[in-house]
Image: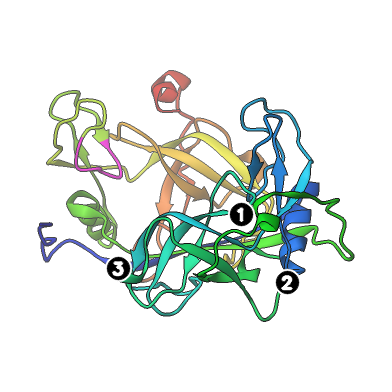
Amino acid sequence: MTAASPPDVLRAPLVVEFPFTRSLGPVQSAFLTGLREGVVLGVRTSDGKVMVPPTEYDPVTAEEIRDLVEVAATGTVTTWAWNPAPRPNQPLATPFAWVLVTLDGADTAILHALDAPGPEAVRTGMRVRVRWAADRIGAITDIACFEPHEGAADAADAGAAPHDGVFADAVTGIVAEARLDYTYSPGRAQTAYINALSERKTVGERCPSCRKVYVPPRGACPTCGVATTDQVEVGPAGTVTTYCIVNIKARNLDIEVPYVYAHIALDGAGLALHGRIGGIPYDQVRMGLRVEPVWTEGGRHPDHYRPTGEPDADYDAYKELI
């Protein structure tokens, strides 16, 4: 049984999204274009096994493989898990089973959803078949799901027939919409850190063993493995230990490029945190530059760091924090 979080510990919903655009090699292109056409393709490895979904390199020999074969749209469930509460954008909106299915003619299993009325209707060894999506675009979602199938494997379907992988208007690239929705809690130590930031203070925690001050605090020292409860205010000024120049504008971030993002070792801290450097041309930022936080009205964290006007820190003073 999991204990409830203390009422003073912060919690908030968090969504992480990343639309990943990638090009396709000849094998993956043929596989996804085949799905669009209602054909399931695999690839034969050097030892004669048929892999579905196909890979472009042999997992044993690492040799490039392009020996495409067509397998059946029917198969056998090898293992499964029931999903009682589907999440947004999963294959089905009603409860379903995640299944690994070895298609007839294949030697490896493909993961997808099985439309079943309940967990009692699912079993290892059951026969299933592909339910094709009504509108197919050349993506794994062209398989809408699997559904129960009473028929045994036909002799004609049991083998894998050679296929040239040639289709008209082949799919050459995809956009994978990765998304993760969850509730994040920073825990006791980082809750104290976040609350201190709202008061324009930076608070870390000192390890009672090695005496290193962690900012942001982690609640425990990862080196010594002991709890850290001794709170220490650090900064506000610090030293740039290393940095990068950002030349690509991020979506929904109203900052003109180029700009500098740096690791900053705040005075009294045992490791560096990151922050944006402003108030100075990007090509004048350097290691050892002394900086201080700049807060905006109502901001809960520093908007950026700017030079203090002090002489640069000596390299020996921050070399262990790079």
Q: Which residue is mark 3?
A: 12
Please identify the dominant SS of the magenta region.
Answer: loop
**Residue count near mark 1 (Cα–Cα under 10 Å), binned few <14, some 14–19, many ≥20:** many
Q: Mark 1 falls on what kind of element?
A: loop
Which residues fall within the magenta stretch? 214-220
Labelled disc at residue 104: 1
**Residue count near mark 2 (Cα–Cα under 10 Å), binned few <14, some 14–19, many ≥20:** some
Indicate whether residue 73 is drawn in magenta: no
- Sequence-wise, which precedes: disc 2 or disc 3? 3
Marks 3 & 1, CB-CB < 8 Å contact: no
Q: Mark 3 falls on what kind of element?
A: strand
Q: In the rendered view, does 69 fall on the left or right side of 113?
A: right
Q: Which residue is mark 2?
A: 137
User: Which label sits in the foreground, 2 or 1?
Assistant: 1
Q: Which residue appears at 41% of the width and 74% of the height?
A: 116
Marks 2 & 3, CB-CB < 8 Å contact: no
